[in-house]
Amino acid sequence: MLIRFLWVGLMAGLLAGVPTAAIQHFTTTPLIIQAELYEQAEHSDHAALDGPTLLQGGAVIPAGYLLAHGPATEGAADEWAPDEGLERTFYTSIATIITAIGYAFMLLAAMFLAKSEITPRTGLLWGLAGFAAAGLAPSLGLSPELPGAASAGLLSRQIWWITTVVTTACGLWMLLRISTPLAIGIGVVLMVVPHFIGAPHPELLTSEVPSELAAHFASSSLVLHAIIWALAGTFVGFMWQRGETPAEQ
Amino acid sequence: MISASTSRVSVQSNARTIALTMFILGAGLVFLTGFAPSTTLHNAAHDSRHTLSFPCH
């Protein structure tokens, strides 16, 4: 049983993560790199100049500084960061695939605990619910941000993000799985409360990044988020049904 | 009969424990890529954190 769970989750995560990482490489990552140029210009007096790096598009930026930026990581320019090009793509892809495996594990576990049928079709629906909870709901308060965008303290945003995702997921569960009038009422309240309290925002909404770039990134990011959840759910159902397991226990 | 029923309950309970463990393991993986405060992990997962709209920086 344990082996089957691990196998299905790992394979579903891989099958969802690899195409998402590929799409990410051609859509959101170039926007992030572009935004970092604006951020770079703003912070150039703090830069750790280990030698210039040529980015795609021909822009020259100082090496060793690109990923160590913003107040949360200021002074951390000497920390390890992947080199531009293949190494950065590699680590970004690995991070996306690991996240997809995490989503697949959680989806499979939730479907199993809910005694749901586990098929590609139900998996897709659970995946879309996951996207609603972890993608759409927090984006109502904290839109997907590019580097250099103005934002409130990291910890407060992380706490709000996690709270919103958990309460939305619980709310959806009560609405869609329990579905009594009382459960529906509680579910709606759970989903609304984080937005009623409000996400943490900075006092001044200043940004070094052009708004067109930020808007493009926000919409692309949400689509990527929808893709990773939908694929993770679908492949969880697909792999579970295939029963591809080295040794069921 | 009682023994078979007890065994079935035990198997179901075992499967639930495994599912719960998987859920926690999945959440742990997402925490590592999306939230872990380590600068090295942040730098490695930086672009994915932004793309998947985890709060970053």
Image: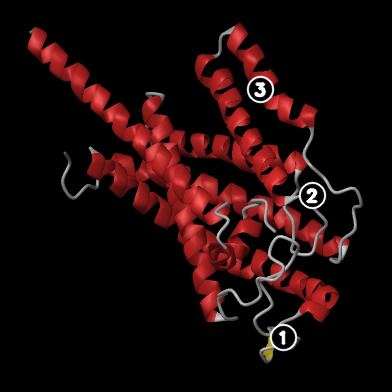
In which chain is the residue bearing label 1? A
Q: In the rendered image, which quarter contains the C terminus of chain A? A: top left
- The kind of residue on which mark 3 rests is Leu
Please provide percent x and percent y for residue A159: 66, 40
Which mark sits nearer the N-terminus, 1 or 3? 1
Residue depicted at x 53% and y 59%? A20
- Mark 2 or 3: in front is 2
Using the image as rendered, state which of residue A148 and residue A108 is in the foreground.
Answer: A148
Residue identified by numbered label 3: A190
| Residue closest to the far bottom | A51
Residue depicted at x 36% and y 30%? A112
- The vertical placement of A59 against B45, above or below, is below
* Circle 3 residues within 10 Å: few <14, some 14–19, many ≥20: many
Q: Is residue A69 left or right of residue A124?
A: right
- Mark 1 or 3: in front is 1
Using the image as rendered, state which of residue A81 and residue A185 is in the foreground.
Answer: A81
* Circle 2 residues within 10 Å: few <14, some 14–19, many ≥20: some
Mark linked to residue A62: 1
Residue identified by numbered label 2: A152
Label 1 and label 3: CA atoms lie apart by 46 Å
Q: Is residue A44 left or right of residue A249?
A: right
Q: Is residue A193 left or right of residue A95?
A: right
